Image (tube, helix red, strand yellow):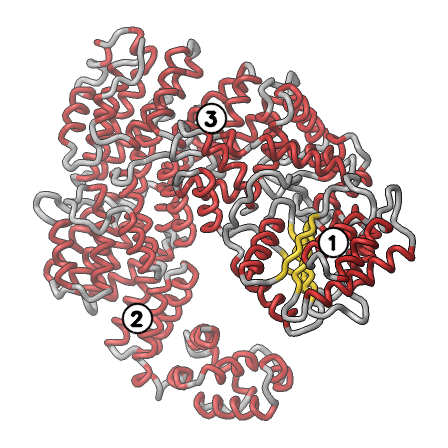
Amino acid sequence: MHRTDEGPKTSMTGRQAELRRLGAALEDGARGGPVRVLVTGEPGIGRTTLLRTFSAAARAQGRIAVDVPCPPHGHQPPFALARQLAAKLAALLPPEDPHRTALDASLPAAAGRTGPPGQAAADTLLADVRAALAALTPDGPVLLSLDDAHRADTASLDFLRRLLLTPPPARLVLIASARDGESRAGGPGELHELFAGARHIPLVGLAPSQSAALIRRVARRAPTADVVAECHRACAGNPYLLTEVARILRDRPAAAADATPAAALRPAPVAESIGTRLAGLDPNAGKVALAIAVAETHSAADPLLVSHLSGLTLAETLAAVDLLVCMHLVGDDHELFLRHRVVRNALLGRMTLMARNAAHLAAAAYLHGKQAPAERIADHLAASTVPLDEPWAAPVLLRAGQKALAAREPDRARRYLEHAVLAASGEDRRVAILELIDAKIGIDLAQGLHEAVRTLEEATDDALRLPLLARISTALYLGSEPGAAARTTLTAGRAGSGWQQVHRLLDGLHAYPLPSAAQLGDERLAPKGRGLGRRTAAEADFCGPDRVAAATSVVSALRGHLTCRPADAVRDAREALREERGLCLHPVLRLLALMVLTWNGRDEDVTAQLRLHHDCADCHEHPLHRALLLPVTARMALMRGRLRTAHEQLGECVDALVHYGTRPQHPLLLWIVGMLAEVRLATGQGAEARALLREHGGLGSRSPDWLHRDVWLTRARLRADGGDLPGVLADLAEVTGATTPLGPTGGVHAYVHTVDLLTQLGRHAEARDTARALLRTAEAMDTPRERGIALRVLGALGGAPDGEELLREAMRLLAGAHADFDLAHAAADLACLLFDEGRYEEATAELSTALELADRCGARPLAARVRQRLAASEGRSAGRSPLGGVLKLTKREKQILVDAVRGSTNERIATTLHITRRTVELHLSSAYRKLDITGRKDFPHLFRTAGLWPLLVDSAST
């Protein structure tokens, strides 16, 4: 980057560590002998300012300092730098000094005009300079500052090298600066030889705090922290670039204080100075830098694309890139990128708009021919203000926008999709419009809804209008305060009362006993269709009677479920889902209808409906289609014991709702958060469950409605784990109080957790009553899994002999329903009962089953409890089986024994564990003694004791 020496000198920001290193070099020079220091760095990094500041400080301390700047090549004849040095030394001597007289006499002879002086004249000048330095340094060193040494001519560099040869001048400190990558232009051999072994100070970008200080000083005001941080990142801490940006900020006082003006990050002087500098070094370097600026979008540029855009061969391109890398303008990587965003913006700013368009469209066509990823092609298509008239352009933009939405990058998606709408037609344009609305809603709910309404008012095709209206209604429901959806007039024209009535239903769904929703549902359902007939034909055509009827059926299903009428709930949920296209554009209502079926154990119905909605094109029109099916599939996975799958799906659903703008305290979001927290507790992530509830306000004191009961129960279980039994009691009073009677809102597990908590509190009568209520509800559901869970809970409370009978029947039902998680609990409960009766061998077998199932499900707390029960039984079982011996083994003994049982020799075990063979033999002997066996021939006995081998393997690996 070119720098002129005219104008006032600017003060330096930072560089205190570098100044200290230069000061140490000056002190070393004072003790005798020449000291050489080379300061290097990228263009504009502040080398000149550092040398000037240090020279001024040295003069202030009474030191002799000689500053010799090197002008650009061709501005002065060869040997000019050496003559300039001699002249400045002569000026430091008194007029009558003989050394000054000698220098004045030898200078004219060394003043060659077309080439360096003759050898005799150069030798004479060298001797006179040595003598002058000796005369100037009797009491202190001379500081010789050589700025831009990469510009120095060969003859002058050779003169300096000879000056420092033996005998070296005493007390001379030579400090030179050179730009990285440009020394080749001034004779690399001489410059490198001159500073071989010298001290090296490489300058790097300023720290963020130093950049902020520089911007404030130059701009004469204090921009916000965000503006300063953006400028620092764009300039990579380069002082010259930061100064140019700050000057624009200073000259534009009307610019917003909290935003960086676009012009500030593309200063014209930067492009001019870079262009001038590169033109003097390599005619291809400027072309390649500009091609990189065009080719670099949100990712680095491909060298082949840069070669294509610059019109150079690959070899010529790589040679120019090497120069740019050495200058620290381009990162040294297999892909190319300009290190300073300001430099890229400035280079692009020098191009005309049409030239930039042509370059980006050429890059897009080239990448499409190379079958590059859609987002790389779309970056260039979106960078042009003129759409590319090619049939492949719109699908590429649409595909890239969909990928960006899936990656939760709405800003990038919006940029792609806006261009896709301009370039597309027909079905592609309709899809692009819908995806664009999704992106805008994800960026800003209010602005996105405003844009969606405007688009809907202009639309004439129902194929576009209905999906748009669905997006508006769902975004209002998830993002607005309660009641706002029903109060808001969604659209102009034909969008009216039908959809507002659906919003009234949605607003009332979370409240128990659904007063507003139930009242409106009664009006819509009795007699069914009577209210629909009063709507205008236009409203019916736009909203559709099937959608309102489906919505009211969902309300009725929820009411039946919450009042413990499973048959009515299942019937109404099936009716809602049977309505032709009734729930296709209502993902929230479809979720609730499917959850009613899931809570009531109708897995076959749910699976069939999931298959239908997976194949339904109308369902896929909505961005939350998959996200709001995840709680359903997660609940089914949980009931089958696939806890890890349930955790992943619920986490993905929460992320999608938050990303789509769902307000933090929305009942639907809190409900799914409660489900996720429940799964986290089941998998042993208590701290994570507590953090999740705290993040979403689930640890507050709000009064729970039916959608919050999972949150309340999970909070009570967390309190129980922490020993806060009064808190557990308070939470249970909220959940089971008269105002909000306990319904199977989370399925049968809501009862299960309540029974467990009541038992921990010592309220056995209440626990038994709740267990009987669970059994009545399960029998009304008439499904084997739910009945098995109810029998398991009641059996665990019942004791023998009824308890054993109930638990064995529960295990039979749960095994047939593949409910592994609850089956593991049932097996553990049965084992406890058997241990109490002294049936230790049978109990150990059941614990083995429970341990295997718990580990398979990922239920770490349950697995830990099973192991604790095994350990607690050691005293009673030690005399009857090797189980007690296993529990006495050390960890190393368990590891060696497991390897031995698996067939490894003692020598191989020693090699694997990095111990001696003798140590292996000692550990095995100890293990045999504890297990009451004589050696390897008795290993089969270990498998005859149920549960011993899984326990041994598991404890050896933990």
Rendered residue at 27%/43% (across/down) = 670
User: Would you name the residue on which mark 2 appears?
Assistant: 831
Q: Quadrant of residue 146?
A: bottom right
Is residue 547 in view?
Answer: yes
**From the viewer's perspective, is the residue at label 2 or at label 1 nearer?**
1
Q: Are marks 2 and 3 in contact (CB under 8 Å)?
A: no
Q: Split into 4 quadrants, where in the image is the C terminus?
A: bottom left
Q: CA distance from mark 2 to mark 1?
A: 97 Å
Q: Indicate the amino acid at tag 1.
A: Leu
Which circle, 2 or 3, is nearer the viewer?
A: 3
Which of disc 1 and disc 2 is earlier in sequence?
1
Residue 517 pos. (x, y %): 18, 28
Where's residue 766, x and y in %?
A: 11, 58
* Residue 629 in view, yes or no: no
Q: Nearer the viewer, residue 519 or 99?
A: 99
Left or right, 77 with reference to 404: right
What kind of element bears circle 2? helix
Residue at x 33%, y 26% (from the top left corner): 446
Disc number for residue 435 = 3
Amino acid marked by disc 3 = Glu
The residue sitting at the left extreme is 738
Element carrying mark 1: helix
| Residue 382 screen position, x and y as percent | 57, 26
Q: Residue at x 66, y 56 (%)?
A: 66
| Residue 376 against residue 732 in the figure, above or below | above
Whether label 3 touches label 1, CB < 8 Å: no
24 left or right of 892 in image: right
Q: Which mark, by number, is residue 85? A: 1
**Mark toward the start of the polypeptide (2 vs 3):** 3
Disc 2 and disc 3: Cα gap in Å? 56 Å
Place of residue 280 in the rendered image (x, y in percent of width and height, measured from the top left): 76, 37
Mark 2, Cα crowd under 10 Å, few <14 / some 14-19 / many 20+, is: many
